[in-house]
Image (tube, rainbow, N blue to C red):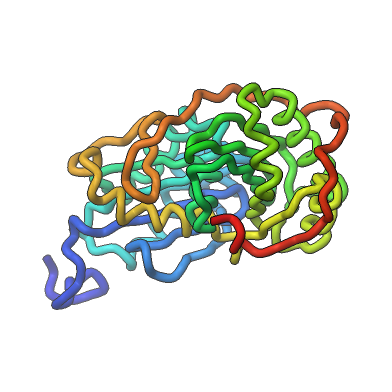
Amino acid sequence: MESGGPFRRRSGAPHPASWGVALDLGSARTRVRVGGRGPVLDVPTVGLPGAARYPVRRGVIVDADGCAGMLGRLLEHRLPRTARPLVVLTAPVLDLPAYRAAARSVVEVLRPRSVLTVPGARAIAVAAGADLSRPLLVVDVGAHLTEVVLLDDGAVTDAHRVALGTGDPGAAPGGIVDAVTRMVAATLRQDDASLMPAALARGVLLAGGGALRPEITYRLTGRLHAPVHVVPAPHTAAVRGAARLLDSARLHPSTRGPGALDASGMLDASGARSRASPQRPRPAAGPPPQAPAPARPRTTGPANMA
């Protein structure tokens, strides 16, 4: 190892094999946390000169080389040259297999010893400290993609999405709320296991940049007739949840050598595997049916999600 420069290992610094990177590649913003406890790096998702201007579009990596170049430039001075980090990567629920393959080629620029993918909704729930043993409805309103995901025992049981977000020109809060309401209604119709009543009684967990807009939160509370719990710092919730999973993932046997877990090998906060139901894309539902049983509309913090 060189004796000087930004990559010199200082006394007491983590061993290269112990480094970890939590990564959330969004259409508009890329968020990274190195080591699981450091500050969240939050930068625009833009390619280097000569590459695609926007290498991630609506949850799809369209320019892997450009995305890798952006990531390498962001982290070149934050990881030692000898580091072989464990990477925990968030992914859109409905495109998990395809996204995982593309994202793995992107993170090769970091020379990872292992790459683990986790559904973004699950990472959000971990960041919120939610009790994953009970049904939970997660709404993630991003810049160009909005997802509604039903979790049970930490596993994805149903998911819907729409290619609409706060960064789309002319995307009014009312339009985003309408789309979320339709997806929640579709989840209710398809709820064969009768998980949704318990999830709605518990309250909706709201994250993403859209959760920073009070008009969206207020309208969702009224339309869904259910409590809406906004995750603290909702725009970075996914990467913070992925960072919390780093500690348990480091102890998992699958991370002791090169490779990656598949969609059925997600890790929860305790390090145990959980099931992940295969998902198929569904179009946004039509007009919503009768809303759930009314409750007094209110918006609360995440304290009641435990």
Quadrant (top left, top right, bottom left, bottom right) of the C terminus: bottom right
Q: 244 above or below 256?
A: below
* Residue at left offset 41%, top offset 62%: 33
* Residue at left offset 25%, top offset 51%: 250
Quadrant (top left, top right, bottom left, bottom right) of the N terminus: bottom left
Please tell me in which quadrant of the rendered image residue 43 appears.
bottom right
Horizontally, is 241 left or right of 215 in the view? Answer: left
Please tell me in which quadrant of the rendered image residue 60 appears.
top right
* Residue at left offset 40%, top offset 54%: 22
Residue 220 place in picture, x, y as percent: 80, 50
Horizontally, is 37 left or right of 200 in the view? Answer: left
Instruction: Look at the image and tell me whether residue 47 can be seen.
Output: no
Instruction: Look at the image and tell me whether residue 189 can be seen.
Output: yes
* Residue at left offset 50%, top offset 57%: 129
Please tell me in which quadrant of the rendered image residue 107 appears.
top left
Residue 72 place in picture, x, y as percent: 38, 55
9 or 230: nearer the viewer: 230
Residue 102 place in picture, x, y as percent: 44, 34
Residue 7 place in picture, x, y as percent: 23, 69
